[in-house]
Amino acid sequence: MRKLIFALLLAAFSLGASAQFEKGTKYVAASLSDFGLSYNKHEDFRLGLHATGGYFIRDGWMLLGGIGWEHFNGSDLVDVGVAGRYYMVRNGIYFNLGLKYQHTSPNLNNIYLTPEVGYCFYLNNRVSIEPAIYCDMSMNHFKDFTKIGFRIGFGYYF
C-alpha cells in the first residue's frame, strides 16, 4: 500500500513539475547577482539586481527579456537584454544564452554575450528558487570587462 501511495505522489509531482515548461506559460523573476563573488581582475565589490520576464514558445523553450542594475567600484551600471532558455524538463537544469547592452556612468557602453547554466528548485507548482552560474563576455573590451559570477533568484510561472 505504501508503494502505491508513493508512486501516485511521485506521478502527481512529476506531472506538476513539467507543467511549468509547457508552451504558452509565462514567467517573471527577480534575482540578485554577484554578492562580491564574481571574478574579474578589476573588481573590488559588485552587487546586482535583475528583473526578467519570459514566454514559452515551445515546450521547454523560453524567450526572455530583462533589465538590471549593478553597483560596481563606486559606479552604477544599467543593462537591458534578451535571451533564449532551454529547460531539461526531467531535472530542472536550464541553459541560457543571451545578449545584453550595458551602460556605465560616465558614458561607457558595452555589449555582452551571456551564457548561463542554472537549476530550478520548485517550492510549489508556480514558484521556484533558481541558482545559476553565468559568464558576461564583453564584445567591446573582452580582456577588461568579461566576468564570471553567481546569481540566485525567485521565479514565478503562470
Image: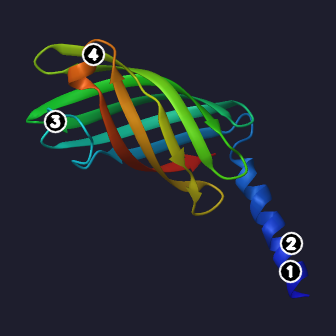
Mark 4 vs 1: CB contact within 8 A: no
Mark 4 vs 2: CB contact within 8 A: no
Depicted 51 relative to depicted 57: above or below: below
First of labels 3, 4 by sequence position: 3
User: Alpha carbon of mark 4 to alpha carbon of mark 2: how far?
Assistant: 51 Å
Q: Amino acid at mark 3?
A: Phe
133 sits to left or right of 91: left
The residue labelled by disc 3 is: 72
Badge 1 marks a residue whose secondary structure is helix
Please tell me how crowded label 3 is: few (under 14), some (14-19), or many (20+) other residues with Cα within 10 Å.
some
Badge 3 marks a residue whose secondary structure is strand
Mark 3 vs 1: CB contact within 8 A: no
Q: Amino acid at mark 2?
A: Leu
User: Alpha carbon of mark 3 to alpha carbon of mark 1: how far?
Assistant: 52 Å
User: Alpha carbon of mark 3 to alpha carbon of mark 2: how far?
Assistant: 50 Å
The residue labelled by disc 2 is: 8
In the orientation shown, which residue stands out farthest toward the bottom? 1
Q: Amino acid at mark 4?
A: Asn
The residue labelled by disc 4 is: 110
Quadrant of res 144: top left
Q: Amino acid at mark 1?
A: Ile
First of labels 4, 2 by sequence position: 2
- Quarter of the image that includes the N terminus: bottom right
